[in-house]
Image (cartoon, rainbow, N blue to C red):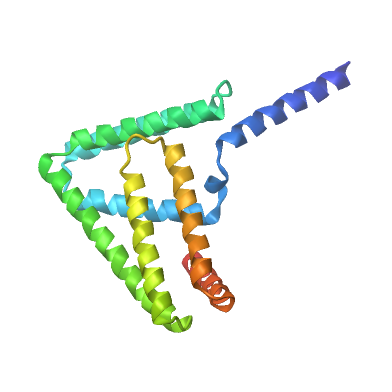
Amino acid sequence: MKKILSILAITAISFSVTAQEKKETPRQNNPSHQQHMRHGGKHHGQMMKNLDLTDAQKVQMKANREEYKNKMQLLKQDQNITMKEFNEKKEALHKEQKAKMLALLTPEQKNKMAEMKATQEKQREASYNKHFEEMKIKLALTEDQAAKLKSQHETTIANMKALRENEKLSMEEKKQQMKAIKESSKEQRKNILTADQLKKLEEMHKNKMENKAK
């Protein structure tokens, strides 16, 4: 009888751990995703610093972050909800946190934040153009290939921006559609580049990720 109870206890614990793991998406345990999150957090922190927040704003924002963190911790520990309910509640908390942050900012600070975001977009585009010129040389692209890739990139960026700005979609829906956009972009490249060029491009991406990880 004791042996049976022990087995049941172990099974219950295993089920509990598995249920918790289901709420942690594969991306959260992915090194490249963790690096992306750290990179995004660094930019956000720098942006907040450049807004010249008052001491009162800093104190309130810290309190809001702690409240959000505690609510998320409780949500992750809730074993009585489905994955869909978890994602919905997670999204609601995220929107609540964003709304509280924006409510603390003055109109001038909000304008400054918008300007900084626009600057970041220009910097990203400049970085891509530099990378594209290097890729053009390394892959020995023809003018026709270069023009098609450039057009494809512009379409992809426009679709991603429209998706990010779509407030009607949930975070999960945005994630799935963002994945679809990236997959579509990847497939389109296959119709533009040769097999050798695709192989070289894959090696370039691999080396880039390895260098970022260092």
Report which quarter residue 81 is drawn in: top right
| Residue 214 in sight | no
Image quadrant occupied by the N terminus: top right
Looking at the image, residue 152 lies above or below residue 103:
below
Please tell me which residue is depicted at 30% across the width and 50% down the height of the picture: 45
Looking at the image, residue 8 lies above or below residue 136:
above
Residue 110 rendering spot, x and y as whole percentages: 17, 44
Please tell me which residue is depicted at 19% across the width and 35% down the height of the picture: 104
In the rendered structure, the answer to whether residue 12 lies left or right of residue 124 reads right
Residue 180 rendering spot, x and y as whole percentages: 49, 50
Looking at the image, residue 158 lies above or below residue 96:
below
Q: Residue furthest top?
A: 1
| Residue 127 in sight | yes
Please tell me which residue is depicted at 49% across the width and 52% down the height of the picture: 34
Nearest to the observer: residue 180 or residue 133: 180
Report which quarter residue 144 is drawn in: bottom left
Q: Tag count in the figure?
A: 0
Looking at the image, residue 94 lies above or below residue 52:
above
Nearest to the observer: residue 43 or residue 199: 199
Q: Residue furthest left?
A: 108
Residue 114 rendering spot, x and y as whole percentages: 19, 49
In the rendered structure, the answer to whether residue 4 lies left or right of residue 61 reads right
Residue 13 rendering spot, x and y as whole percentages: 70, 27
